[in-house]
Image (cartoon, rainbow, N blue to C red):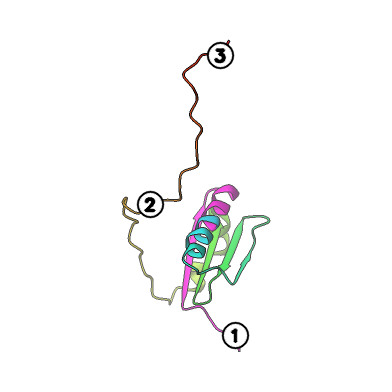
Amino acid sequence: MTSVADYLVLCSGESERQVRAIAEHIDQVLSAQRLPPLSIEGTSTAQWILMDFGDVVAHIFRADIREHYGLERLWSDAKRVRLPAIPASVPAAPAPLVKKRSGRARS
């Protein structure tokens, strides 16, 4: 028996790099909370990445691909839930370590 996700998340980026970055961030945040995806598809081209978390399925599109396929039309009868903006106090991913340069000038 195939189960259907309770929630569908649709989002998009302007380029393959943005799409990949969005998917990587979702994976990092949820995996850190011990909620790794059951499967991920589409990372090789990053035009449309699907992340299956069981009850939640995330579709991350390149903007033009999202417009072309129009999944919103297929799910038009589904209840839409707006997510609140993330407060500024929520820490982002840890900043990379930066080696501080010495004050000496090069010769």
Query: Which badge, 3 or 2, is on the more N-terminal residue?
Result: 2
Identity of the amino acid at label 2?
Answer: Pro
Task: Where is residue 57? Give x, y as percent.
Answer: 52, 71
Name the residue at 35% across, 54% down.
Answer: 90
Helix, strand or loop at label 3? It is loop
Q: Are marks 1 and 3 in contact (CB under 8 Å)?
A: no
| Quarter of image, res 36 | bottom right
Q: Amino acid at mark 1?
A: Thr
Q: Which residue is mark 2?
A: 91
Residue 88: % across, % down? 32, 50
Residue at 50% x, 68% y: name it.
Answer: 34
Magenta segment: 1-23
Q: Which residue is mark 3?
A: 106
SS for dot 1: loop
Residue denoted by label 1: 2
Give above or below for 89 relative to 71. above
